[in-house]
Structures are given as C-alpha cells and as structure tokens.
Amino acid sequence: MIKLLGVILFALLLAACANCTESILDDEPPIIYTPQIIEETPPPVISYEPEPILEPEPEISFVDYWLEQLTLEEKIGQLIMPRLPWQTTEVNARLEPWLESIPFGGFILFSDNVQSIEQVQALTASLQAQARLPLLISTDEEGGRVSRVGRLFDGGATPPAFEIGRMSLHYAYDIAMINAERLQLLGINMNLAPVADIWSNPENAVIGNRAFGNTADTVASRVADTVRGLQDSGIFATLKHFPGHGDTYEDSHYQLAFHNHDINRFWAQEALPFISGIEAGVTAVMPGHISTPQVGGHSALLPWMQPWIDSGNLPVTFSDFWLQTILRGEMGFEGLIITDGLEMRALTDHFTCGQIALGAFLAGADILLIPANPAEAFQALLDGYHNGYFDMERLNESVRRILLLKELL
C-alpha cells in the first residue's frame, strides 16, 4: 500500500514538471548564442623601399691615372734619361729652358755634376721640383774605379766588386747598403749597378775588377746580395751588361764589342748571374752594346738592320731576340730594360742618334740612357709613332713599367 502511494506521488511530480517545462518553452523564445565576430582593422601596409646600395667606384691606381693623363709627348719623354749638360751643378736660368723643352722622365749624374753632399741634394731636389712626375735620378756607383759620388763621403768609394767577391758571402750585401744609404742621402734613387759580367777573359780591361769574380758561381751569389742590399735600402738596382761583357776584348765605349760564343755557352755561364739577380727581384737590366755573331734569331725591326743581321754583327741593343725572346720570355724578366749609354761609339760610329733611339725602343728597351742628342732621340720616337712603327699599346707597356717605379718614390 505504501509502495503504491509512492509510485502515484512520483508520477504526479513528473507530470507537474512536464507542464512547467512546456510553459517555459512556450512563453519564452529559446536563447541562441551567436558569438560576436570582432573585425580587426589590419595593420597599415608600410611600403619600405631600401635605398639602393651603391657600389663604391674603384679607385684608379697611380699608374692608370697617369697613363690617362699623360700626352703622347709626355709619354715619350718618360723614356729618355739624358745626362745633364757638362759641369751642370744646379738648376739655373740657363738650364730651365732645356728642362722645359722635353718632359724627361729622369736624369743620370756624373762626377762633373757632383761637388759636395749639400750641392747634390740641392740639385736633385731642384730637378724633382720642376717635374710633373717623380724623376728617376740615376748614377753609376759600383765602387772602386766606377764611383761618381763616393769621394764625397768619409772613407771614399767602397771597394771594387772583385775585392768584394773575395770576402765572406754576405759582405756584398753590407757594401750595397752603404752605397744605398749614400745615394738616398743625395736624392739619387737608381744605381746602375751591380755588374753581372763574369771576368772570364783576363785581357778584358773594360770590365776587369768591376766584376765580382772569374766564375759564374762567385758572381751570381754576390750579384744577388748586392741587389738585395740596394733594394732593401730603397735604391733601384740594375744588372749590366746583358748578355755578358766579361769575355770580350773590345771596350764598347769606343767600339762595338763581340761575344763569340753560342747560345748554349750563354745558358751555361753568362746567364747565371743575371738569373740570380732577376730571382733576387732586381728592378732593371741593362743590355750592352755587344754583338753575338754565333747567335741568330733577330728581326729586322727597321730596314737598316738587315745588313747587320746578315753579317752577324747586330748589337744586342737592337735585338728583339735577346731582349724579348730570351730576357723577357725565357728568363721571365718583367722589370725595366734600360740601355747602356747611347752616346757610346760602339753605336754612334755606325748609326744616327734617331736610328739608335728608335731601334733600341723597338727591340724592347724601356728607357733610353744618354742619347747623344736628346732632342733628336725624342723626335725620332715621335716620328716612329706617327709613321706606324709602334702603337700606343707598345708605348704604354714601357711607360707603365716606369710608372710602377715612380709610384714607389
């Protein structure tokens, strides 16, 4: 009975709840939740254009700058290194017109230009002051009997090369440094030394004790040390007299000299000191006015050369075989080729000043040393250019080599 009443009561409660639910649902609309969409304002688009990165303009080198700036005449002037008029010891009103007539690239000083340390300093400073570009100012300061400035210093000239060759191995380096310090003090920046010839002919008086010795080994080692001693101290060195003046009888100051050996002998002996000096980094090489009758391969760069080639007497000064094929090609020398004095009778007894200047340049020389008539030499090169014997590319090759040195001054 009690259970029955409980069931009836539970049923009544369910019914009441059902009516209540229906009432709520009928009277109030259902609540539908719609999430609110908040529209976010997009951030402003910033248009950023970075400034263009400009490539820095390459700095033009000293050499390239002057190759562009120099006129044809100025470039040809760079090739000529005359001596000063006899006994010139200062730049004065008489000398200035000559200096202004041709834009010379340098000068060589001899004993007659030298009176005292102070006088040479003033002379070289004055010469430099009047030039548009630094000048190469050279002299022959070998020591011994070929000394232009040694007498100005305590102790006089340094010993001759042959005496140095008998000393300890590195004595040559020390002597070269002494000469270099003297030259620097005077304002001279190029020494036409050392002699790289081998004194293999005892009767050869023009070389004699100017050579470091009688054998290739002795000369080669002292040549290398001398080159390093000069150039470590800021003086440009010059090997001479290519391809070797040590086994000749003649003195090329007065007549053409002859080296009567073939090319195999050259490579076995005369070449060795030059190779040693080149490996030491020498600045310049000076060909001698020497004929090599047993060596051929020369080109007739100018019409007058052919008879000299046919006879076997063409001087090395005019030989593209010696200067281009051998020295530049097989020996790999990239520095200056500077002639021996072009006023020497080995040449002037046979050729005009103009022939000598143009012939040497066409063969491969970069600097023409002491033409007998500088104005004639200058005009011959100018005419050679206009007549098509050489072009601006060839001229620039030599001027570039000269400027590479002047950049260091």
Image (spheres, rainbow, N blue to C red):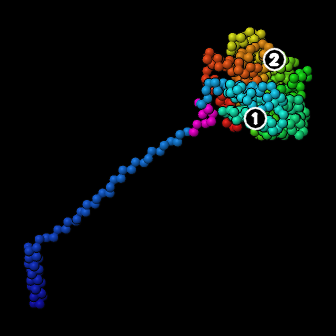
On the image, the x and y values in percent for residue 34 come to 20, 66
Q: Main SS type for the magenta part? A: helix
Q: Residue, x 74% and y 14% (percent of image)?
A: 352
Amino acid type at circle 1 is Thr
Q: Nearer the viewer, residue 170 or 66?
A: 66
Residue 124: image tag: 1
Q: In the image, is residue 138 part of the stretch drawn in magenta?
A: no
Q: Position of residue 371 (x, y in %)?
A: 75, 21
Q: Residues within 10 Å of mark 2 (few under 14, many from 20)?
A: some
Label disc, if present, on residue 342 of the rendered structure: none
Seen from the viewer's position, the closer of residues 349 and 43 is 349
Name the residue at 59% across, 30% down.
68
Tell me: residue 344, above or below residue 140: above
Q: Which mark is residue 345?
A: 2
Q: The N terminus appears in which quarter of the rendering?
A: bottom left
In percent of width and height, residue 5 lies at: 10, 88
Question: Which amino acid lies under the numbered mark 2 shown in the image of this protein?
Answer: Arg
Residue 43 is situated, as x and y percent measured from the top left of the image, at 32, 57
